[in-house]
């Protein structure tokens, strides 16, 4: 058996009276070709009194761009940051690490997607870029400082349904070291496949495939099978 895994959960550690800085990325010409980056910087600062600093840079995700953000966080005494750039799926973790290196809470960060949602889909995406960036400012102003903590997780799984999919999933999990509880509402497992003579598209004998799996499941010490049973309540969280 492998050791218990750990899940990360977040707990509140402070308030949200924040000094917010905005950094707008050119992404080379990906953004700046259809978005007036200088205007975004200027109007975001003018329209929101929550913004105490704003600037732009050609590639914020680059090492010099990250260094710029880190330096300005310290110089301007920022404690929350908005990055107007590409999708959060690209570099959210990158910028969180920058905040952490700069000494502020890494979760006081919001990313306004002005590339995929603006410059790549509009001939002139400036107004929308301004709106998305201002929305990110409002959002980050309501963020809370969070602290990640680790909690242990039991290596135990519930599989609902004893058809071929449930049997296969149970065996895979058990062979990976998990304790499995398999719940099936019928008197026997096998599901629809047990009622077929052949499988598509190979026309193999269904029982020839299913029976060995059912035997393996019944002999596996990590799998507990409950037939004529249903799940009536689920609680807790992950």
Image: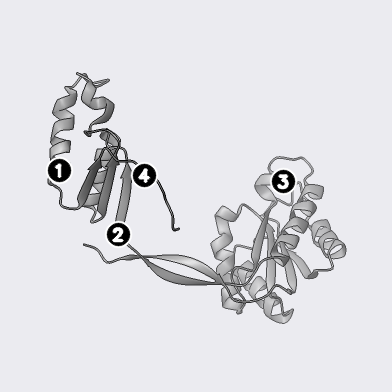
Observer-side mark, 2 or 1, equals 1
Location of residue 226 (image quadrant): top left
Tell me the residue at 30%/59% (across/down): 155
Residue 218's tag is 1
Give the image quarter of residue 134. Answer: bottom right
- At 80% from the left and 68% from the top, the residue drawn is 50
Estimate the x, y position of residue 51 in percent, counting from the top left. Answer: 79, 68
Q: Which mark is residue 231?
A: 4
Which of the numbered marks, if any, corresponds to residue 155? 2
Of mark 4 and mark 1, the one earlier in the sequence is 1
Secondary structure of residue under mark 2: loop
At 70% from the left and 56% from the top, the residue drawn is 26
Q: Mark 3 falls on what kind of element? A: helix
Sooner in the amino-acid sequence: mark 3 or mark 2: 3
Residue 55 lies in what quarter of the image? Answer: bottom right
Q: Across the whole image, how many numbered discs are drawn on residues?
A: 4
* In the foreground, 157 or 105: 157
Q: Does dot 1 land on a helix, a strand or a loop? A: helix
| Quadrant into which the N terminus falls | bottom left
């Amino acid at each position: 058996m492998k050791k218990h895994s750990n899940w990360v959960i977040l707990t509140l550690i402070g308030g949200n009276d924040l000094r917010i800085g905005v950094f707008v990325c050119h992404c080379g010409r990906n953004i700046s070709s259809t978005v007036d980056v200088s205007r975004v910087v200027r109007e975001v600062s003018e329209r929101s009194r929550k913004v105490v600093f704003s600037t732009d840079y050609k590639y914020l995700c680059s090492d010099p761009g990250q260094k710029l953000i880190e330096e300005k966080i310290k110089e301007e005494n920022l404690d929350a940051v908005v990055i107007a750039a590409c999708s959060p799926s690209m570099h959210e973790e990158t910028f969180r690490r920058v905040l952490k290196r700069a000494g502020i809470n890494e979760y006081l960060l919001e990313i306004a997607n002005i590339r995929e949602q603006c410059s790549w889909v509009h001939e002139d995406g400036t107004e929308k870029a301004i709106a998305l960036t201002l929305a990110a400012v409002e959002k980050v102003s309501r963020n809370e400082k969070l602290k990640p903590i680790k909690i242990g997780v039991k290596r135990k799984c519930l599989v609902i349904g004893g058809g071929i999919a449930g049997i296969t999933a149970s065996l895979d999990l058990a062979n990976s070291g998990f304790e499995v509880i398999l719940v099936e509402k019928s008197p026997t497992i096998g599901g629809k496949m047990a009622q077929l003579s052949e499988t598509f598209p190979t026309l193999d004998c269904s029982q020839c495939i299913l029976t060995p799996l059912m035997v393996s499941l019944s002999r596996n010490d990590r799998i507990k099978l409950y037939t004529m049973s249903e799940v009536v309540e689920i609680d807790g969280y992950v």
